[in-house]
């Protein structure tokens, strides 16, 4: 095979469980909004434009939006985007992947604010609407991973947002404020107790399906 024909295979070098590729305390979230309306472009881009992103690194491409930085500010920005995208009567979903500690991560493309003052919360804290949700937690590199999953599910019970367990996911329901308060607690716990975790979140509003 000639040099021109060689495929650009990737290599992750010495990446290993328990060794974060980033030296900074970076939490990241990649998410996609899917509003079921012919105005989806305006809804998605309008919501993204309203989010104050001065305390996170952010980028939007043709697939999704990414926020990276301190955990508190990343969740603040994701919550703001969900709230700003909400329109009464419009079915919409958000698919989000929250992660911290990936061995393949780097310090690049991130921003860590010096303080914990949330930029978006004052504008969105009094906005309420019901949300259906499913989550799946993946604690990486630990043998007793089910313990951490159970702890996070039990947090949902304590927070009053637990609906039921299902195949491959835990079902949650509650006000948008309560759900994001739970995400804050769950990710704080995971960040403090796991070297690497992935939390998959699906949020749904105004679904025409009863169950």
Image (cartoon, rainbow, N blue to C red):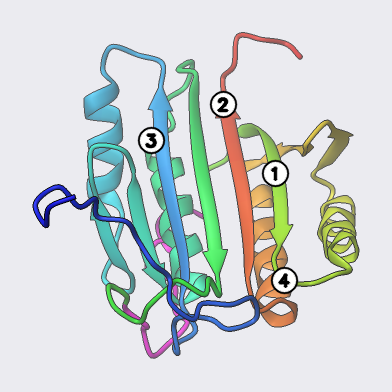
Which mark lies nearer to you, 1 or 3?
A: 1
Instruction: Read off the residue under disc 3.
Output: 85
Residue 155's quadrant in the figure?
A: bottom right
Q: Residue at x 31, y 38 (%)?
A: 63
- Rendering coords of residue 110 (x, y %): 32, 75
92 left or right, relative to 50: right
Task: Give the mark nearer the N terminus: 2 vs 1.
Answer: 1
Q: Secondary structure at mark 3?
A: helix
9 left or right, relative to 198: left
Q: Secondary structure at mark 1?
A: strand
Instruction: Read off the residue under disc 2.
Output: 205
Q: Main secondary structure of the magenta part?
A: loop
Which mark lies nearer to you, 4 or 2?
A: 4
Disc 4 and disc 2 in contact, CB within 8 angstroms: no
Which mark lies nearer to you, 4 or 1?
A: 4
Q: Secondary structure at mark 4?
A: loop
**Residue 141 disc label:** 4
């Amino acid at each position: 095979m000639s040099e021109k024909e060689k495929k650009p295979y990737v290599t992750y070098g010495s990446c290993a469980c328990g060794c974060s590729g980033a030296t900074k305390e970076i939490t990241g979230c990649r998410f996609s909004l899917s509003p079921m309306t012919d105005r989806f472009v305006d809804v998605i881009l309008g919501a993204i434009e309203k989010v104050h992103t001065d305390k996170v690194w952010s980028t939007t491409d043709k697939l999704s939006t990414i926020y990276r930085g301190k955990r508190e500010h990343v969740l603040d920005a994701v919550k703001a985007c969900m709230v700003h995208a909400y329109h009464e009567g419009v079915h919409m979903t958000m698919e989000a992947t929250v992660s911290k500690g990936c061995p393949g991560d780097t310090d690049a493309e991130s921003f860590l604010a010096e303080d914990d003052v949330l930029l978006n919360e004052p504008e969105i804290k009094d906005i309420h609407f019901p949300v259906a949700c499913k989550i799946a937690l993946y604690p990486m590199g630990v043998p007793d991973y089910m313990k951490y999953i159970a702890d996070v599910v039990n947090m949902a019970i304590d927070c009053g947002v637990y609906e039921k367990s299902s195949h491959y996911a835990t079902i949650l329901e509650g006000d948008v404020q309560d759900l994001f308060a739970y995400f804050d607690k769950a990710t704080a716990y995971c960040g403090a107790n796991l070297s690497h975790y992935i939390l998959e979140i699906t949020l749904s509003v105004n679904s025409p399906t009863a169950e």
